[in-house]
Amino acid sequence: MNVLMVIAPENFRDEELFHTKEQLEKAGAEVTIASRDTNTCSGMLGGEATPDISLRDVDADDYDAVVFVGGSGSSVYFNNPATLQLAKDANEAGKVIAAICIAPSILANAGLLKGKKATSFASQQGNLISKGADYTGDGVTTDGNIITADGPGSARDFGRTIARAIKS
């Protein structure tokens, strides 16, 4: 199981990266971290992560799942053409696509949530609904190959849910 986790260069949400990654690795996944470049990224709570790969070098076909980590910094990807294309490519290839906190707006803006059940941090509810999502407000929501979560408190459950989806 190969999982790509996409984080913002600054202000990714620490738990959403580290707790989710921990659960994926416990389940046997090999986790690759990607960001805008491979410089060290900083979390909102002071954590740091050094990406393994730059987003421009990512090929969705190399992964079983693509996970977009939230935190206030992830808004840099809301309308980023390369990030939206990555989400679309992963979806077209039938990969598991996951996003937590405000990051489900990346999936909504890529057109992937139309007619799908989804959740997010409350601040993104309006955007998801405006892009055709059936907003649940749950901690973690799965609809087909798409998994969304509401925020840091759901990060471990989010990670376990992604691991189960890849294995099934």
Image (spheres, grey):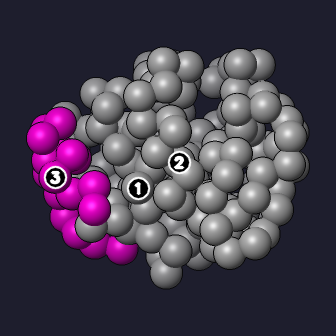
Residue 107 image position (x, y, % from top left): 38, 38
Q: Crowding near pointer 2: few (<14 within 10 Å), some, many (20+)?
A: many
User: For mark 2, what is the residue?
Assistant: 74
**Start-end of magenta stretch:** 123-139
Gap between marks 2 and 1, in whole Å? Answer: 7 Å
Residue drawn 74% across and 38% down? 34
Residue drawn 59% across and 40% down? 66
Gap between marks 3 and 2, in whole Å? Answer: 17 Å
Residue drawn 41% across and 28% down? 79
Q: Amino acid at mark 2?
A: Ser
Residue 112 image position (x, y, % from top left): 31, 32
Residue 16 visible in the current orientation: yes
Q: Amino acid at mark 1?
A: Ile
Indicate left or right for 22 with 121 as reference: right
Choose top left, top right, bottom left or bottom right for residue 105: top left
Which secondary structure, mark 3? helix
User: For mark 3, what is the residue?
Assistant: 126
Relative to 104, does residue 114 appear above or below in the rendering? above
- Magenta highlight on residue 143: no
Q: Amino acid at mark 3?
A: Gly
Mark closest to the chain's N terminus, 2 or 1? 2
Gap between marks 3 and 1, in whole Å? Answer: 11 Å
Q: Are marks 2 and 1 in contact (CB under 8 Å)?
A: yes
Count of labels in the image: 3
User: For mark 1, what is the residue?
Assistant: 102
Residue drawn 49% across and 25% down? 80
Q: Crowding near pointer 3: few (<14 within 10 Å), some, many (20+)?
A: few
Mark closest to the chain's N terminus, 3 or 1? 1
Relative to 47, does residue 81 appear above or below in the rendering? above
